Image (tube, helix red, strand yellow):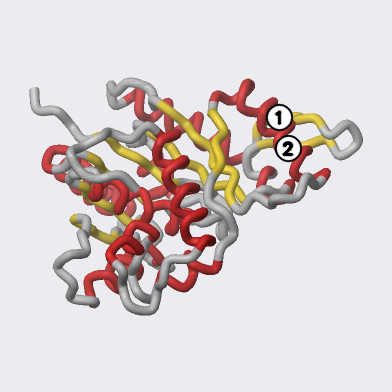
Amino acid sequence: MTKRAHVIVVGNEKGGTGKSTISMHLIMSLLDRGLSVGSIDLDARQATLTRYIHNRAARGDCALPLPDHISVPSTDDRKADEARLLDIVNHFANTHDVVVIDTPGSDHFLSRMGHSFADTLVTPLNDSLVDLDVLGRVDPATMKILRPSHYAEMVWETKKARAIRGERSMVDWIVLRNRLSNLDARNKRDVEKLLADLARRVGFRVIPGLGERVIYRSMFLEGLTLLDLRRKITGFDLSMSHVAARQELRTLVDAIALPVGSGSEV
């Protein structure tokens, strides 16, 4: 039997959590490790990941690795859209080592279907009670989790869809606490406690994500990632902030336990 690719889905029904930035850095980390990567953008309307990759390709620098990428727009024909996505995922799964799927920040049938392919689900979450609401409902009086929220319920439904197809359950669900503050604020402590409780109930693990750094936004138009700083590209001199950001990325990639190829480290 041909070994199929490991599928990583980056998903959250809330926008502005850094899904496309995480997706791009995961893709480049995988390529950097010598793995073949197929990437799928299901957020074809906003298409942040697609534009990020196009910006990179437009540089015309053959030293910059690129994934085999495709954007999947939705039409008025749901069955045709689902069949197309299934064909793309199957093709990439049989021709690449890893498939990375970036999903929209909303509830959409293609997003749900994309989630159902996940061997690993990565959910970036800004470190706030507002963002936590997509995972669990909090009682403001007791500051305890009342019940899982709509996104957690959707993940459970997509696990069942995977089982119906005769596939094993999702291997790993990871929640990234993005944009963590260095301050020991009450909000930060509340989120940490609530996430730990919810993780036990719903079945995910929590790891640190990427900090709030200007470098991530400034690199988008250039199509660059933190890994490219080693190439001494004009206009991006390595600073202590960049070194710290690279360590964040290294910690993130190691925690996700991605497949390791023959390439170099972050």
* Residue shown at the point (35%, 23%) measured from the top left: 163
Residue 11 x, y percent position in the rendering: 47, 46
- Residue 188 visible: yes
Q: Is residue 262 left or right of residue 181?
A: left
On-image quarter of the N terminus: top left
Along the horizontal axis of the image, is 59 left or right of 119?
left
Q: Amino acid at mark 1?
A: Arg
Determine whether 16 is above or below 130 in the image.
Answer: below
Residue positioned most to the right: 141
- Check contact, mark 1 vs mark 2: CB within 8 A: yes
Camera-side residue of 101 and 262: 262
Residue denoted by label 1: 147
Mark 2 lies on a secondary structure that is strand
Q: Quadrant of residue 114?
A: top left
Residue 257: x and y, percent?
37, 32
Res. 226 image quadrant = bottom left
Vertical placement of residue 215 versus 171, above or below: below
Q: Locate residue 155, reporting x and y percent.
A: 49, 34
**Amino acid under disc 2:** Arg
The residue under label 2 is 137
Left or right: residue 100 versus residue 68 is right
Within 10 angstroms of label 2, few (less than 14), some, or many (20 or more) residues? Answer: some
